Amino acid sequence: MLRLAWRNLLRTPGRSLTTGGVVALVTFLSVVLLSLYAGAMDAFFGLLLERTGHLVVRVEGYREKQVLEDLAFPPPDLSLPQGARVEGVLEGAALAIAGERSRPVALTGLSREGFSRQGNLLKAGRLPEASGEALLGEALARALRVGLGDEVVAYAPGGEGIGVFAFRVVGLVDLPESHLEARTLLVPLEDAQTLLAPGRVTRLEVRLPGVGLYEEAPLLALKASLQEDLAPRGLVVETWLEANPGYAAILPLYRVVMGVYVGFFFLLAGLILLNALYLSLVERVREFGLLSALGLSGRGVMALVFWESLLLVGVFALLGLGAGLFAHLEMADGFRMPLPQWILEQYREFGLPEVLYGRLGLSDLLLVLGYALGVGVLAALWPAWLASRLEPVEAMRYVP
């Protein structure tokens, strides 16, 4: 049966190559798409993790609180595993004044480690190294008409701090989000505390070594341990995904959406395969009638059509899979999106880097092969059923 099915495919090499080529192309594109999108997701969530840390400690109910005095707290000592790092961050509103110009800003106090992560955003100048030095968003610097070496005064009355602090601009940052760039003022944590809330922070960021991007078990275990100690102080511990619920909602939908995309590609391939199998049936009605007259049962005829479909899909799906894996290996080393500059600007608005790294898992390969196998079976159902219903005598008299 298998040999006969293979011989039948070779009888029409043009049609078989065309149909198989479509299957191979769809398989190749599906593998590349899955690798590309997984790499984009990793880049996006990696950036999110870098910004927030693995765990975040804030005051309980912080989402409903607006006043800095209600959001700031003295940083407690945390019992952390070896190698873990904790960084304090103080965020507050202020008015940035330069000469006669002023702009409302989101003032953020960072530790030295926090500033080191801003290095890839640095457009000009250097990172702050001493008290009284600051980074400004490029858009904010243009609005205030200041540059490197100029003085900017942060004014924040009504708090527990001194309410006014002069900073020297030592660097300009180019943020992915342009609307944030126009309001960003980054200063040393100690200066921010002096200005806004002495000895306090609005959040603690905990970073753990050796924890994968999507590993939740070690985070949840440490969260439970810390929460037990911090709850009496009115503090809450969140994982980086819990701290960003809007983005976290994307993860469960990602595989569903990608499954739908890949399924749509294979649906188109299935329609082409169905057309090829039906044309083959029409051309071979007399042959099927002869096989039935020689004793081949209806199930045997159906099996022959199924074998032809599965052989065609299987061989070319494996070829497409091999080509897709080769492309994935190239993308896994890093690649730039071949997009026009104006699209890349929109791309950066979401905070995504221009260089991505493809990622492909076993489940992705099984998804593609499963779709290919499913298409091979479903596309053959109707032609196989028609072939099995042919009457031998009438079929042998058939003239196409």
Image: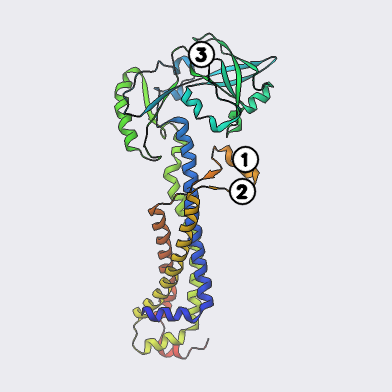
User: Which dot, 3 or 2, sits closer to the camera?
Assistant: 2
Task: Indicate the colouring scheme.
Answer: rainbow
> Callout 3: 10 Å neighbours few (<14), some, many (20+)?
many
Question: Quick one: quadrant of the N terminus?
Answer: bottom left
Up/down of 1 relative to 55, above or below: below
Task: Tell me, yes or no, if residue 261 can be seen here.
Answer: no
Badges 1 and 2: C-beta atoms under 8 Å apart? no
Amino acid beneath label 3:
Leu
Residue 193 percent location from the top left of the image: 48, 14
Q: Which residue is mark 2?
A: 339
Q: Which residue is mark 1?
A: 345
Instruction: Classify residue 223 as left or right of residue 153.
Output: left
Residue 188 percent location from the top left of the image: 51, 19
Q: Nearer the viewer, residue 343 or 246?
A: 343
State which tag comes first along the sequence, 1 or 2.
Answer: 2
Badges 3 and 2: C-beta atoms under 8 Å apart? no
Q: Which residue is mark 3?
A: 196
Residue 215 percent location from the top left of the image: 36, 39
> Callout 1: 10 Å neighbours few (<14), some, many (20+)?
some
* Residue 151 numbered mark, or none: none
Residue 375 percent location from the top left of the image: 44, 65
Identify the residue shown where x is 67% and y is 24%.
143
Gap between marks 3 and 2, in whole Å?
Answer: 44 Å
Amino acid beneath label 1:
Glu
Gap between marks 1 and 2, in whole Å?
Answer: 10 Å
State which tag comes first along the sequence, 3 or 1.
Answer: 3
Label 2 SS? loop
State which tag comes first along the sequence, 3 or 2.
Answer: 3
Label 1 SS? helix
Up/down of 371 relative to 19, above or below: above
